[in-house]
Image (cartoon, rainbow, N blue to C red):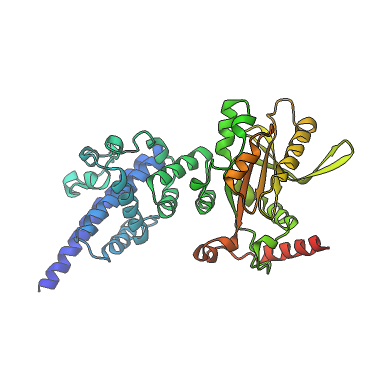
Amino acid sequence: MENNNSRQDLNTEISASVKALKLAILQAQYAASADSNRVMLMLYLGIGRFISQKTRNGIWGDGATNAIAEQLQREMPGLRGFSGVQLRRMRQFYEEWHQSLICSPAANKLVVPIQLNTSEKQTDTPDALSAVLPILAEWSICSPLVNKFNMEEFFAISFTHHMEIIVKAKTIEERLFYIHAAVANRWNKDVLRSMLKADIYHHSGTMPNNFGTAITETKLAVKALGMFRDEYLLDFINTEELDITNPEDIDEPVIEHAIVTHIRQFIMTFGRDFSFISNQYRLDVAGHELFIDLLFFNRELNCLVAVELKKGVFKPAYLGQLNLYLQALDDQVRKPHENPSVGIILCRSADKSFVEYAVRDFQKPMGVATYRTSDEMPEKLRNALPNIEELKRQLSDAGENAES
């Protein structure tokens, strides 16, 4: 008898919860025409809070969210994005940001002023709005990141973006970095995943270079300093697929071919606003032919960017070679309205302190970055990479051509 009563109480609780969530969803959808992403994120945060309070306090068991999702689907045919899995993601979304930023009692008392014509009285949905749709505008009251947190940016990216960031970036500083970068650069979810995988938070703006002295315009120098990273993940180069035991045995033409074949991937990895011009770009200097491995144009910097590929450890002689290329580009190719060309050496490994010492007296703006290939990634991440049989065939052909 007691079990029947408990089951009946649970069914009553689920029905009341479905009614509250259903009203909140309808109200959010009604208001979404004015500010869709903000309203929906507020809805997800509110639902996450609601579910968190029920499940973390032992009110609901493991199957309650699935039961609610199924009943919501029956009562709102065609409703998408509110499966049991999604409801639990909303709980995670709320809990991650709640634990990190919310500490103001006022934040939980404010509600979204959404009104919807309905025949149901407010009393029929007990505490629906205050439980489901809290405004979190007071997050910054006691957050140590008050000067960094941008509410507009937070609400400018999608729920999918937020979940990618929450799962793969563990600190608040990292998460705010990726939120800002996703908004500033208009990253779609695929680009965001690539940037998270490449861990650009820990590599942006740390490349050894001479931009601070070689670029005379301060604003441009700052842009260049933030543009390039100290390390790039070229996960489309898989040495195991090439049957190469030692990654350092890859020939530079093979690396170049792989980059050109997957130029869109490389540009996504390399950074924003890059346009590919050519590989093996030919220059003629006093009757001597020079060939730049990869030549790009960057709209943000308004300049040509020359990239030289090196398969081994950094050598100071590379800087002299690159300096000559940049001089020829500026004399022969650069347009009058463009800024001086920038050069990047992309090599297997480099001692940052040594590079900084070697590059500091060059007049042309240059930097040195390193790269990793897929075989150097953690095993778990490497196994998640897509099948690249086609790349294997193309790179094998390139390797044979390089040998011949």
Q: Position of residue 391 (x, y in %)?
A: 68, 62
Looking at the image, residue 284 sits to the left or right of residue 31; the answer is right
Q: Position of residue 134 (x, y in %)?
A: 26, 42
Q: Position of residue 12 (x, y in %)?
A: 18, 61
Residue depicted at 76% across the width and 35% down the height: 329
Looking at the image, residue 102 sits to the left or right of residue 230; the answer is left
Residue 151 position (above or below residue 80) = above
Disc tally is 0
- Residue that protrudes farthest toward the bottom in the picture: 1
**Nearer to us in this view, 51 or 23:** 51
Q: Position of residue 281 (x, y in %)?
A: 78, 43
Residue depicted at 22% across the width and 60% down the height: 14
**Nearer to us in this view, 138 or 370:** 370
Looking at the image, residue 251 sits to the left or right of residue 236; the answer is right
**Nearer to us in this view, 12 or 334:** 334
Q: Is residue 300 visible?
A: no
Residue depicted at 76% across the width and 61% down the height: 398
**Residue 227 lies in quadrant:** top right
Q: Quadrant of the N terminus?
A: bottom left
Residue 326 position (above or below residue 251) = above
Residue 361 position (above or below residue 126) = above
- Residue that protrudes farthest toward the right in the picture: 287
Q: Quadrant of the C terminus?
A: bottom right
Q: Is residue 352 visible?
A: yes
**Residue 392 lies in quadrant:** bottom right
**Nearer to us in this view, 128 or 339:** 339
